[in-house]
Amino acid sequence: MSSLKTVSAVALAAAAMLSVGGSYAADLSIYSDKTPWHDGMAEAADIASKASGATIKLQEITPTDKYQAFMQTSIAGNNVPAFFTWWNGQQLSDLVATGAVADLSSYWDQAIKDGNFSAGQKDLVSVDGKPYGILLNVANWVVFYNTKDFEKAGIAAPPKTWDELMADCDKLKAAGFTPFNAPASGGWMPFIWFSQLVLGTNPDAFVGLTSNKTAYNGPEVHKAFQIWADMYKKGYFTDPREQDDSKFFADGSAAMFLIGDWHSGQFATMGMKPGVDFKTFLMPSVTPDVQQSVIVEASPIVVSKAALAANPDLGKAIAAYMGPDVSNALGTKVQVYNGNLKGTPPNDIIKADNELVAAAKPRALVRWWEAVPSQIQGDLVAQMGSFMLNPTPENGEKVMTQMQQINADYWASK
Amino acid sequence: MADTATSLLSSALLKDARARERRVAWRQTRVAWLFIAPAVILVGVFLLLPVLVNVVLSFTKWQKFTGLDKFAGFSNYARLFAVPYFSEAMANTALWVVGAVVLPLALALALALLLRNIAFQETLKSLYFLPKVLAPTAVGAIWYYVYAPHGVLNSVVSGVSGHGFDFGWLYDDNTVTPSVIVTFVWQTVGITMVLLLLGLAAIPKDPIEAARVDGASPGQVFRHIVWPLLLPTVLVVTILNVAAGFTTFDLLWVMAGDYPGKRTLSLAVYMYYESFSNGGWAYGSAVAVVLGIMVIAVSAVLAFVQSRVEKSIR
């Protein structure tokens, strides 16, 4: 009989442990897959904790697909973490549709009133006019260039038109450099040049790609693929099979790298001095009469509606996350800028990019990755990657057909 | 006799004796259950319950955040045959199963026979077994650099041929699966060899000696005596490798993570990709159910063959 009692006690203890485990994710935690930003995220959590009186712990899960899977199962199981990082665009719309995340309108109104953020920045994390995210990172997509490579190739100033850019590519090739670092790693990078060439020739078509108004095998995409294949043929891109996405740019063998300016911190850690060893310029449109566009990448932190309702003090943490101290902590620790107007851009490159964008007034576009339905995101990127591995016009035709098939199947199932 | 003895007892005594017997039996059953309860609970909670939940999930519309509470009928199963990916993953899995069974078995058998009669056999056995103690992800990471464009294999080819060679073994449709199968064989051949050596050691010496005395050649001895007696072990190894071939995931995911067509490299990869990368939890569950049924069916056939072989030996 005593044995049975022991077994029962063990079973009860196990049940108690399971129930504790069940509530763990709902504790005051901020979940993130952005492990390279650990130090900045941890300090931001400390600042928010002090402001709210709560203890907000940073929990990290990587890689991204595992993180997304964790969040999807948590939300489906009605066990939403208090704070977690997410993506804007379609990804945010899908999340908002679950009703799990809080409308942050009142916090944004206050932040705009206090001069921390602008109404335009609010739009980056809004769905149907309501903001659902705190800005964690706002990055412009620019072309980084290696100043020494440019100097050796006899390029005095960065190009302002597509023709100038192509002429500079030839000069760089002649000087022994590969013009562009173009990796296909990480499960997402193949979309970079695909997006750029579509938006550089027809930004409306680029926007239409994400809402089924433009076909992936339509004339606009054909034109982009022709340019892409031609650039590969001329040897303008590095080997897409390299796993270290910054290696060829950091070692100087590739002179340019089209990427979000949050990468400047990474180049700095690889020994390149921002503003000295590398600078940036805005990518010119391919077609001269098309307005210049710039991709604006915004990473939001979202807040659980249930956690906020249960713990009103979280509001103080939200306000702290939207304040300049968190912005400066992110900048100082990990060279990431969340766009806070009272915050200080973390380095000269990001400061210069903001000035470039302010001067050129390009059309701001949401990144393809966030804008496209996430259910077909990976499949389409895989197709783009297969083109990069075999960048012939014939393979381009095949890839475009398959992409359109994936796209059409998805929209037909809606 | 029993009737006579019973008839001597009063009904009250008999009732009492039977009640006592039942109490003892119940006490013994209770003690027995106490001992097996941990195993039953663990298997039930961590094996059977997840399988059951997975089957239930495959009949829902759960995709990404929503649909967990919506019944989908057999639509997830119907979709398996409506899209090309499932059949592609199936074809690659079939290639994997054949590669995972035939190659390790053939190589391991050759090694087992060879190592029985040579010097330093214990050292060599340990060396061949060594890859098995490594985690498959570590093996995948190591072999990734063997096959990398500027990796070991291409460097050797470049050195031998005198020309630069940077073929992407893990990026080409025709070479990606065979390349990973080679890695699997490298890791598996040692354990397969050890199992076959145990089987060989269990074969009685007498019939072999008798055959030799009767003038049988080594080939005849192997074909007519060693192979039939080794067959039960071969079948056990085959069942293990078939299951491994069907469920191969880690090596493929680590080594071919950047291969654009990785989704269909095997059914296990397809299941993971649909669930974790695309958020199609219900559809991924349907793939898992079909994969599970296939593994169970093939293993059952092999187990049946094994029992027939064992009976025929007896």
Image (cartoon, rainbow, N blue to C red):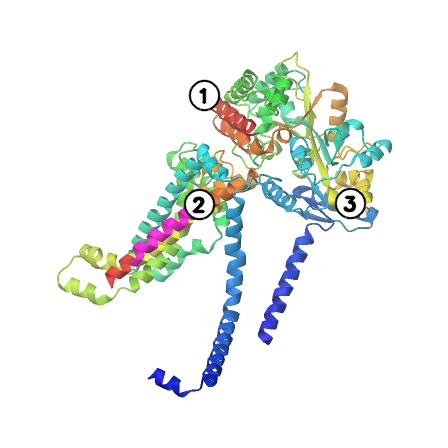
Q: Are marks 3 and 1 in contact (CB under 8 Å)?
A: no
Magenta span dominant secondary structure: helix
Q: Nearer the viewer, mark 2 or mark 3?
A: 3
Q: Which residue is mark 1?
A: A394
State left or right for residue A349 relative to residue B256. Answer: right
Q: Nearer the viewer, mark 3 or mark 1?
A: 3
Q: Chain of mark 3?
A: A
In depth, the one of B88 and A350 nearer the eye is B88
> What percent of the width, then of the height, locates residue B133?
46, 56
> What percent of the width, then of the height, locates residue B253?
50, 42
Q: Specify start and end residues of the magenta stretch as a single range.
A: B293-307
Query: Looking at the rendered structure, which numbered label has been put on residue A373?
Result: none
Q: Residues within 10 Å of mark 1 (few under 14, many from 20)?
A: few
State left or right for residue A392 relative to residue A269. Answer: left
Going from N to C along the chain, the mark reached first, 3 or 1, is 3
Q: Are marks 2 and 1 on the same chain?
A: no
Q: Which residue is mark 2?
A: B291
Q: Are marks 2 and 3 on the same chain?
A: no
- In percent of the image, x 16 and y 62: which residue is there? B212
Type of amino acid under label 1: Glu
Report helix, strand or loop for mark 3.
helix
Give above or below for A282 relative to B23: above
- The N terminus of chain B sits in image quarter: bottom left
Type of amino acid under label 3: Ala
- In percent of the image, x 81 and y 42: which residue is there? A320
Q: Are marks 2 and 1 in contact (CB under 8 Å)?
A: no
Q: Which residue is mark 3?
A: A309
- The C terminus of chain B sits in image quarter: bottom left
Q: Is residue A135 magenta?
A: no
Report helix, strand or loop for mark 1.
helix
Q: Chain of mark 1?
A: A
> What percent of the width, then of the height, locates residue A9?
63, 68
